[in-house]
Amino acid sequence: MKMKTSRVKAIDALRGFSLLGILLANMLIFQYGIWGKDELQYYSVSPNDKVFYYVIKIFVESSFMPIFTFLFGYSMIKMNESLQMKGMKIKRTFIKRAIILVVLGFLHSEFLWEGDILLFYGCMMIFLLMFLNRKPKTLLIWGMLLLFLTSLIGYGGVIEETPSEKNQMKEYVLQTIDVYGNGSYSEIRHHRITEMPLDLSDELFFIIVLLMPIFSASLFLIGMYAAKRNWFMNLEREKIYYCVGASVLLPIGIIFKSVYLFVPDGSWSGVMGMLGGNLLALGYICLFALLYTITQNYKLVKKFEDIGVLSLSNYLLQTIIFTFIFYGYGLGQFGKLGLINASLIALGVFTLQLYVSSWYLKYFKMGPVEKVLRFGTNITLKRKKDHNHENSVQL
């Protein structure tokens, strides 16, 4: 069974759009490291790159990953509906899928890159099972409640680092610049796994891990609510809602993120920063849905649908390409290329992925990593029945 509604195509296109934003945001991590991206004083950054850095921080970072999060929750509901129609064991299927994501994420973070999201998404899938059969109203209430309550932890402004912590961060970043830019694969991997700029106790680390699903659940739940309400089912009829959403959420999100970036010491700046990223993401979703009603037949939009279908394979391929460009075992451009140049290369790579994805789908129904995920999910069920989930529902 393959769903062919414009709703699903819109979701695929939105997934492709979010993949572009995630790649641009990841240019900060690829080039400066997951800790160094907020410590640019230790890098040689041109004035133009500094301005572009603020553009990325306001318009891109923390506002495209939530779109992917929203889509993950949306897809869980649609997959749940599909499994119910087929009479399959729902929790068992989701748990197997989650385990595969966790394994892929572990391998990704252990052997390639520190910015992995798959392991976290696999864990969140298990956490979200308790919400699968909740009413739409319940999902919305919990989603909005967590969205605002978790933002309150940012109240009070930025906590000033002690001289010892500043020195520790400086030493870590300078060491990272040397190892990532000049080191071998084994040296980079060892540094990534063993070195940390902050000394976190085991107790504090455990508390952070325990609370992480709660602090991250809001957009997952709002996405699940949207799926139960069949958002993107009739884009023309829903156009007015997307127009209002984009008009309200986009400026609020941009203002909130700007205040956090330029007035970090304000009591409410942290709250606005945490809230602004998610509100801007929801605004982007509304804007994209609105534009999709006009452009859905354009060839370029079709290519975004295609790369969205292959999002998992393309996401991992981006890691391979850009770790080679920036790390010492490749071209060694860590901290050297500049943010504008890196972003232009990212746009070039993404454009190539758009065309390759469209070509690939002429011959295959799903990407290689998507096949692994599908095979692992279905492998124990084939003795009973040959099940085949619809290609357009992806996680």
Image (cartoon, rainbow, N blue to C red):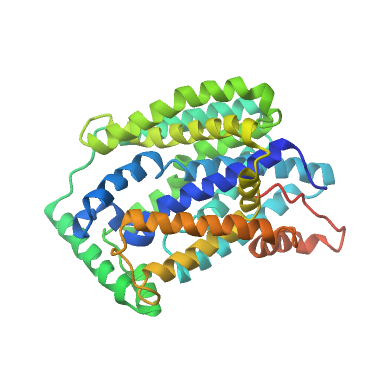
Q: Residue at x 35, y 78 (%)?
A: 187
Relative to 251, say whether 345 is above or below: below
Q: Position of residue 81 (x, y in %)?
A: 75, 40
Q: Nearer the viewer, residue 248 or 331?
A: 331
105 relative position to 280: left or right = right
Q: Position of residue 33 (x, y in %)?
A: 33, 60
Would residue 395 be seen by someone viewing this image from the given angle?
A: no
Relative to 133, say whether 382 is above or below: below
Q: Residue at x 55, y 30 (%)?
A: 286
**Can you name the residue that lies furthest to the front here?**
299
Q: Position of residue 377 (x, y in %)?
A: 71, 59
Q: Position of residue 25 (x, y in %)?
A: 41, 50
Residue 360: quarter of image: bottom right
24 relative position to 1: left or right = left
Relative to 226, say whether 318 is above or below: below
Q: Total label count?
A: 0
Would residue 262 be seen by someone viewing this image from the given angle?
A: yes
Relative to 102, say whether 231 is above or below: above
